[in-house]
Image (spheres, helix red, strand yellow):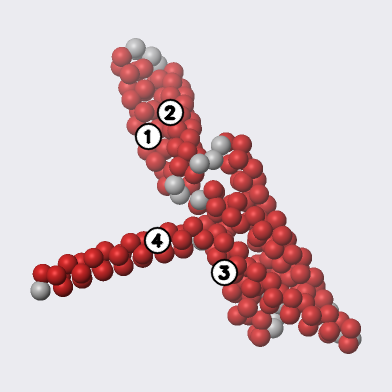
Amino acid sequence: MNPFLSFVLRTLIAIPTAGIVWLISFFGYDQSILLSTTFAVAGGFIIYLIAKTIMKHRFLKSQGLTRREYKYIEKNLNEAKRKIDRLNKALFSLKQLTMLKQNLEILRITRKIYRITKKEPKRFYLAERFYFYHLDSFVELAEKYSFLSAQPTKNLDLRLSLQETRKTIEEMRNSLEKDLDQVLSNDIDQLHLELDVAKRNINTIQDESRRLK
């Protein structure tokens, strides 16, 4: 579930509970306003935590993950978010219009992989090559390229190095596309299966129509 919607739902459960606890404490047990409010806040907070625990348990169960696995994935996703922010900063510090389209495509793919695995953590294992190798390489290359290209004077050796780096970044962009394909591989396989089933159903209907004629 979306973290914001999950928070809203827990809050919508906790607030009425707090209100009920306050009414029971104040009118049912003749507690003071201050004490009733304290009980209400405590009750609402406890219900909020219980709802959060239940939602997280159901989410992990739907993903087929243990708490330990999810904690490991969440840690790596948080690190990846910081790396993607660095990549974004490095790529958009470049002034070359010729690289703009390529840079936008790189960011689009990296963010898409991140969003998919953030929403469905079980896909993280399909994207390990991206998170542990390609993303780090991209950040390092982009930051070095940004630093070197910002130098006021460029000798031949520096220009050749920048040219080689641009070529390497372009080659690595193809690796990113393969990483995205890997993350989506199960969906693609499922789509092919559904297409095969649909085609068989269509062929069956057509065969029956011919026999009726």
Residue drawn at point x = 74 percent, y = 76 percent: 168
Determine the CA span between mark 3 and mark 1: 37 Å
Of labels 4 and 3, the one closer to you = 4
Label 1: which residue? 13
Dot 3 crowding, Cα within 10 Å, few <14, some 14–19, many 20+: few
Could you tell whether 96 is left or right of 57 in the image? right
Determine the CA span between mark 2 and mark 3: 39 Å
Instruction: Label 1: state its secondary structure.
Output: helix
Residue 49 at what x, y percent from top left?
48, 31
Determine the CA span between mark 4 and mark 3: 28 Å
Could you tell whether 40 is left or right of 113 in the image? left
Of labels 4 and 2, the one closer to you = 4
Between disc 1 and disc 2, whose residue precedes?
A: 1
Q: Which mark is residue 108?
A: 3
Dot 2 crowding, Cα within 10 Å, few <14, some 14–19, many 20+: some
Quadrant of residue 138 within the rendered picture: bottom right
Residue 86 appears anywhere in the view: no
Instruction: Label 2: state its secondary structure.
Output: helix
Q: Are marks 4 and 3 in contact (CB under 8 Å)?
A: no
Residue 51 at what x, y percent from top left?
43, 33
Q: Are marks 2 and 3 in contact (CB under 8 Å)?
A: no
Residue drawn at point x = 20 percent, y = 71 percent: 206
Q: Are marks 1 and 2 in contact (CB under 8 Å)?
A: yes
